[in-house]
Amino acid sequence: MVSDESPSTDARRIGPSFKANHPLASGPVVQPAPTVDGFVEAFLAELNYGQGVLLSQSTVNDQYLALARTVRRYLMADWLETGARRRQAQQKTVAYLSAEYLLGRQLGNNLLATNLQDVAEEAMRRSGIDIAALRSQEVEPGLGNGGLGRLAACFVDSLATMDVPCIGYGIRYEYGIFRQTFVEDRQVELPDSWLSLGSPWEFPHPERQVIVSFGGHTETTTDDAGVERSRWIPDWNVLGMPYHYMVPGFRNGVVNTLRLWSARATHAFDLQIFNSGDYAQAVRSQTFAENISKVLYPEDSTPQGKELRLQQQYFFVACSLHDFIDNTLPADYDLRRLPERLVVQLNDTHPVIAIPELMRILVDRKGFDWDEAWDITKRCFAYTCHTLLPEALEVWSVDLLGRLLPRHLEIIYRINEEFLDEVREAFPGDEMRVRRMSVIAEHPERSVRMAYLATVAGAKVNGVAELHSQLLRDKVLPDFSQLWPEKFTNVTNGVTPRRFVLLANRRLSDLVTDTIGEGWVTDLDRLRELEPHAEDPEFRAAFRQVKADNKERLYKLLRVRDGLDLPREAMLDVMVKRLHEYKRQTLKLLHIVSLYEGVVSGRVAPEDLTPRTVVFGAKAAPGYHMAKEIIFLINAVADTVNADPRVAGRLSVAFPANYNVTLAEKLIPAADLSEQISLAGKEASGTGNMKFALNGALTIGTDDGANVEIRRLVGDDNFFLFGMTEPEVETLRGEGYVPADLYEQDPVLRATIDLLASGHFTGGDRQVVAPVVDNLLHQDAFMALADFPAYLEAQARVDAAYADPDTWSRMAILNVARSGFFSSDRSMRDYLERIWTAR
Ligand SMILES: *Cc1c(COP(=O)(O)O)cnc(C)c1O
């Protein structure tokens, strides 16, 4: 049997022990001022002494690693100082718990944060190296699926820039989101071995390892005071090894920490088996433990209730709470005051098991009585909900939870019992309500509703855009918002202007800075000062030139990366996001097919088409069959359209594989049109929509998620709205939605679907298109056909506006000028005000 004791006592023994009074003991060695010569010298030293090679013998990877380590040096003093300052100040700290961080490449961001781009570029040139090749060498840490993971990355960036004490906690997956390729137009997933060439940005800290236990059973004992207590006797455990990553603020001397956990076998685990003489089994057990952080689950929005996933969730949450309580707080800290020092923000339900874990720490390990522990716990947690899709609300079967975490299940039961008593008191005689609100669902199998648990325990519950927060109150958690209206709040998502404007769109950034000065990067509302320049023909021309340059850069990349040859002049119409039926990539596809059908049927003269290049980027969850069929169909349509001389120069479709942050940074600044066309009431917020608006693309979008707020801010005249509203969707569904009727009644829709169904795009094969076509005609759960006519009409308005470059540029400039609200700095101010300091 293995005990539940942490190794932190050992860790402290091998921790700080340096007692000498040398002046360098208490402060970092500061890197000399960044001159080009100094940078070259540091770089060569890293190459020789860090990498162990001569410049003349070095590979691009050697050079990339040495450059990264050189940049790292310039952040290190600030990192050490920030850490020391945080330990001294004992301020309240945000523990941001997220199973995903979709970080994107680090080199460019860190050069930006240190203001070393020019110095580094010149230093590389003097060393005979093209820095662009080194930038391309970095494999982005793709430790997330999409919006949710990218949001976490934006938030930690903003908190560092605002000098807010924050530790981002998560999992160091050995394999991040899969690398997507296409084979015969179908998605094929390749493993993302992002660590294989070495990761210069991480720092392992074995002295801060934590033991995490699983399985076993509980026993009831009576303590010295005669109080009955439960004791967990787990039967296996693993070690959590933290890797630290720098999170630099923007040129403010602050570097916060992202702490990601990697699973290892414990020695205790090994020894047991070694002693039984089975060496091979002992080594296999090592692998078993390491499996926990092996791979990111590639499902976005539709989690699979897999045991390993629950292991991952508990693993990182247990490591993180332990790390904060035992290794970050002072040793003698009075835990009754924990809420003064800690706020745990739960990024969706993935880390919700932290709630019973904190209860277990307080009650079982620290000897608190239940009520006091519950009072502390309730004041420490806040929960962010990210969805409205019922299938995305995570539940864990009682059976699985009880097997893996028996003590936690007991705690959840008791939390639920006391909570339901509270409901009975508030609504006497309303047993239906009690059953509806129970954290334990009875059907289809007994399971724990993690969103309910988070809502019961969280001091605050927030949605991620105004519409979403309202629907969260009214539709997802209505009983809870009646019981505790004050718990519910909204914080509209945001994106970091450092990565998504300054780094991704240097040309636009230079134009903005030349026009309104520098402060906008950390005070994005100042983009408003661009508004008057929307009327200035010279500024508009400069703005158009920025777009043209960004397109040029993108098309160059796509030629090399994907062998695509795209026309320079056409409108660039972009739909990039995870492939999901609710996001309606098929609606976009129907638009393309209808444009094409118009020309090939002779209904429309090719000269009357506004030249367009449509670019898709999207990964499908490997087990999501319909999504993969849609990918296949987009590729098939792209092949046919691009090869047809009748639409040459008028319509092209590109689907570069492996959409990720790196590609987003190239695509978004080049886009003219941003497609945000989810069925109203389905997209919680979206953040892609914000990145596009900030980079001067116009949005064609539904009244959904943060689109609502984008439209309100940029103005109706500068946004192409179409489609049903959320209440209209509900009404139509109530009336009984029959997509086949729409097909029968609308000749354009019929011709479009008929052409798709005919096998025209698939070499005559009608069978392969049937899954998507039949689904649209007979199910269409996300009502693409219902919004199709409105979508075509809105696209016609897009064409009309695009026909006049001055009109279009004016609208685009106003989008940039009025989108400052969507900085994640503002989101962080809202969290601070509405959630983290309000209690
Ligand atoms: C911003 C971003 C997303 C989220 O896009 P949505 O359109 O909001 O779904 C997904 N993936 C990547 C790589 C991103 O940068």
Image (cartoon, rainbow, N blue to C red):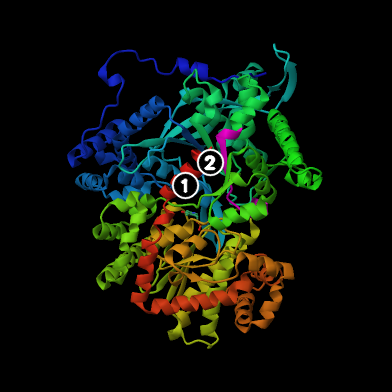
Q: Tell me what residue is drawn at x 47 percent, y 87 percent.
A: 605
The answer as to whether callout 1 falls within 8 Å of ligand 1 is: no
- Which comes sooner in the sequence, label 2 or label 1? 2
Q: CA distance from mark 2 to mark 1?
A: 19 Å
What is the x, y in percent for residue 485? Answer: 62, 47
Is 388 in the magenta? yes
Q: Which residue is mark 1?
A: 830
What is the x, y in percent for residue 761? Answer: 57, 74
Query: Element under label 2?
Result: loop
What is the x, y in percent for residue 822? Answer: 43, 55
Which labelled disc corresponds to residue 649?
Answer: none
Vertical comparison of 769 with 264: above or below: below
Vertical comparison of 194 with 321: above or below: below
Q: Which residues are magenta?
A: 378-392
Judge depth for marks 2 and 1 and give the one in front: 1
How many marks on residues?
2
108 relative position to 15: left or right:
left
The residue type indicated by label 1 comes to Asp
Is 62 in the magenta? no
Vertical comparison of 32 with 580: above or below: above
The residue type indicated by label 2 comes to Ser
Q: Which residue is mark 2?
A: 98
Of 193 and 483, which appears nearest the observer? 483
How many residues crowd around disc 1 within 10 Å: few (fewer than 14), some, or many (20 or more)? Answer: some
